[in-house]
Image (spheres, coloured by chain):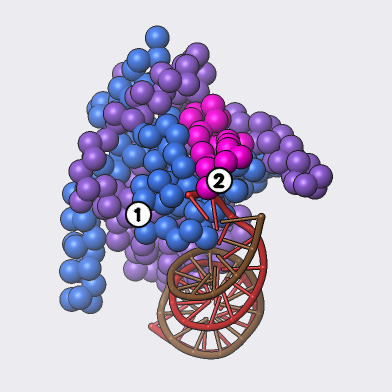
Chain colours: A blue, B purple, C red, D brown
Amino acid sequence: MGDNILKESMTLNDNALSHEDVQEKLSHAKKPDPHVEALVNDVIARVADKWTMLILEALAEQGKLRFTQLARHVTGISQKMLTQTLRDMEREGLVIRTVYPVVPPKVEYQLTDLGLSLGAAFCGVWVWAEENLATIRHARAAFDLRKKGD
Amino acid sequence: MGDNILKESMTLNDNALSHEDVQEKLSHAKKPDPHVEALVNDVIARVADKWTMLILEALAEQGKLRFTQLARHVTGISQKMLTQTLRDMEREGLVIRTVYPVVPPKVEYQLTDLGLSLGAAFCGVWVWAEENLATIRHARAAFDLRKKGD
DNA sequence: CGGGATCCTTATGGATACTG
DNA sequence: CAGTATCCATAAGGATCCCG
């Protein structure tokens, strides 16, 4: 059980859903509760941040990482943003921070079950991005070309 | 066929996946191709923007919207960001912009198949956010409380 | 090693005014 | 109506120094 999580999220893209088919599902996905919607959007906005996603990705792949290891896995992040994002993620309950009282200091980060479930939810997006890289680059080129010839 | 897209993404959270179970899947999800990874991250970063997600959500639900309708559906967005984000999304091939040569002007936006598939991929995240709202709020409160008593 | 504090630059995004 | 253009405030984020 649970050994087909990836296969399932794949089917989101692969199977032959018609335009109307998918749209039908999406349009009925959420009850338009005005108060909840706002909170959901807030959560999404926080969670769908660039660094959050990359850290999540790294921890999902590696399982447990120290501060500097994390810094190496998340290419291009400054230590400031790494610290800050990790604090936020800890606050939202996505990661646990374990401090080992040794010298030199050793701090390990790992995803909580909540963080892991978010990773699973994002899995579909990662797969989507990989699959559609070429399409997007093509779309961009086409768009830019159209613009050049006003 | 294709009428259980939502149910499928639900199972990402609901079934009893062990910590190691999910992690196992996630860690093998992507081949560590260094060049592709960077591009994927770039695409993710662009696409996982707050406004992009909300516009995507609105269009996924409503199917086809005019500029001002869109502005009403995406609460809190300025017309500047609406225009800008729509241009970007058009560039990435996520939406099509249809201009009707009438006066007063009429412009309609709708998702492309690519945009729709992204919506489907994000579906899991939306569901996750809804389901875990309470958990997150609780985690935040607990964290803040911990911090107050240093 | 794992940060905190500070400074400083850039990017983000809102408000407003104007236009076909 | 659906933008474009401009100005401006704030926030995001990098660089650097320091400390337990």
Q: Earlier in the sequence, mark 1 or mark 2?
A: 1
In front of the other: A38 or B147: B147
Q: Residue at x 52, y 18 (%)?
A: B14
Residue A19, relative to residue A50: is it above or below? above
Residue B34, relative to residue D9: is it above or below? above
Please check whether the numbered discs 1 and 2 fall on a single chain.
yes
- The answer to whether marks 1 and 2 mark residues whose Cβ atoms lie closer than 8 Å is no
- Residue carrying label 1: A75
Picture quarter with the C terminus of chain A: bottom left
Residue B11 in view: no
Give the amino acid at mark 1. Thr
| Chain under disc 1 | A
Q: Position of residue A38 (x, y in %)?
A: 65, 46
Residue A22 found in image quarter: top left
Q: Which mark is residue A103?
A: 2
In front of the other: A57 or A14: A57
**Residue A2 covered by magenta stretch:** no
Residues in magenta?
Answer: A93-118
Disc 1 on helix, strand or loop? loop
In this rendering, which labeled residue sits more in front, label 1 or label 2?
Answer: 2
- In this rendering, would B60 be left or right of D19? left
